[in-house]
Structures are given as C-alpha cells and as structure tokens.
Image (spheres, rainbow, N blue to C red):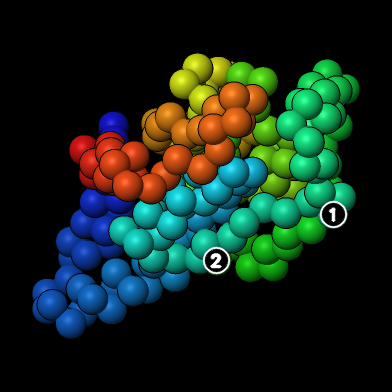
C-alpha cells in the first residue's frame, strides 16, 4: 500500500460520518492534531520526506536528536553505529515528547544504517509506548533497500498496527552524495508518496 493511500484512508475514516463540509474540516483538523511525524535524518533526505508527509497530513513534525550527537566523520559514525547494533546500546534521546498519549497515528522516518533500523529510532520505539496506535514507517536509503528495518519496527511495536512502510532512494554518504531530495528527485519522491 502506498503512503498516500494510507493517508487518504486515515482522513476518509475520520470524515465519513460527518454531514457538513464544515464539520468535515473540523474533524480533519482534529485528526491532524493527533498525528505525529518523527524522523531521524543525518543528510536531510529523510527530513525532506517527513516534510512532504507533513504537507499532506499536518500534525506535529519532530526531529529525533541525541543527548550526545554522532560524530560528523562518516567512517567514525559507521563504526559507532555498528558497535551500538552489536551490543544493543540504545543512545539516549535529547528529544522529548510529553504528550504521546494524544497521538493516534505515528509516522516514523529514518535512513537505513548498516541494513538495520538506526539505534536512535530503536531508542525512540523503546522509550515510548505506541500500543494501540497506527505506526507508519518511512525510509530513505542508499539504494540497497530497508534491510531489516521495517521488520524491526514491527517487532518493537507489537501492540500497534504497523502498516506497510514507504521507502525511497536517498543519498549515498560513503560516496559523498549527501542531500538529493531536490529538483527531479524531489518530484519523483512526491510522486512515489502519492501513488
């Protein structure tokens, strides 16, 4: 299922029992207040996708930040993340969400790191109770796909409705190709989201 289909279903469900256009607008506005879009983005590609989703559904847009940010050097971060994945270390988050219980739908965006879910996203999913919520993962990657990331989201959200995720090719940092979500690539990403 494509992302826009999911988005349309969410807004249709909340509006289907309403009689007037005004009431429908109020319900959609109320629904968007119950949507959280949280994302991790190192090169701003995942951030760009999060912003496109935000344009479509509204809600709150929140970047995941760490208490101790990752180093800037690519090889150093790759080594650190590999060690975190190996040991199961969950880096503490600087980002705090005080009203998680008010959200019904949580979009979770991230890049693929080492063909896995990045440790900060694992921290988020371990720190917050998403039981009973609809969780929609979205991903950018260097062309190798999501690896085990979407299945890890499902594993970490056993009492949530985790719907099929959305994935698109972003940059390839190890090759020096960083932010790519502009121009034609941004148009392609928008079309992928809308299909």
**Which one is closest to the eye, mark 2 or mark 1?**
1
State the image coordinates of residue 190 (x, y, percent, origin top left): 29, 46
Q: Is residue 19 visible?
A: yes
- Binning the other alpha carbons within 10 Å of mark 1 as few (below 14), some (14 to 19) or many (20 upward) gives few
Residue 164 location, quadrant: top left
- Give the position of the C terminus as an image quadrant: top left
Q: Earlier in the sequence, mark 2 or mark 1?
A: 1
**Which residue shows up at 44% across the image and 65% down it?**
59
Q: Residue 178's image quarter? A: top right
**For residue 61, above or below residue 191:** below
- Counting from the top left corner in percent of width and height, residue 143 is at 47, 21
Residue at 63%, 68% (x, y): give it: 99
- Check the image and report above or below for 25 versus 77: below
Q: Residue at x 29, y 69 (%)?
A: 28
Front-most of residues 159 and 173: 173
Label placed on residue 67: 1
Query: In what quadrant of the picture does the N terminus appear?
Result: top left
- Which structural element holds mark 1? loop
Instruction: Using the image, tell me which numbered label, if any, was put on residue 102.
Output: 2
């Amino acid at each position: 299922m494509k992302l826009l289909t999911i988005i349309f279903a969410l807004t249709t469900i909340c509006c289907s029992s309403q009689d007037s256009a005004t009431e429908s607008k109020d319900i959609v506005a109320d629904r968007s207040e119950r949507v959280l879009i949280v994302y991790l983005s190192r090169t701003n590609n995942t951030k760009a996708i999060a912003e496109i989703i935000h344009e479509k559904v509204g809600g709150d847009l929140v970047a995941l930040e760490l208490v101790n940010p990752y180093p800037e050097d690519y090889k150093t971060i790759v080594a650190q993340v590999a060690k975190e994945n190996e040991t199961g270390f969950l880096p503490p988050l600087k980002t705090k969400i005080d009203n998680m219980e008010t959200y019904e739908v949580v979009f979770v965006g991230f890049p693929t790191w080492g063909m896995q879910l990045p440790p900060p996203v694992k921290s988020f999913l371990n720190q917050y109770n998403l039981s009973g919520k609809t969780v929609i993962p979205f991903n950018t990657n260097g062309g190798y796909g999501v690896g085990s990331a979407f299945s890890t989201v499902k594993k970490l959200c056993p009492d949530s409705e985790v719907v099929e995720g959305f994935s698109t090719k972003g940059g390839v940092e190890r090759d020096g190709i960083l932010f790519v979500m502009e121009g034609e690539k941004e148009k392609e990403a928008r079309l992928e989201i809308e299909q």
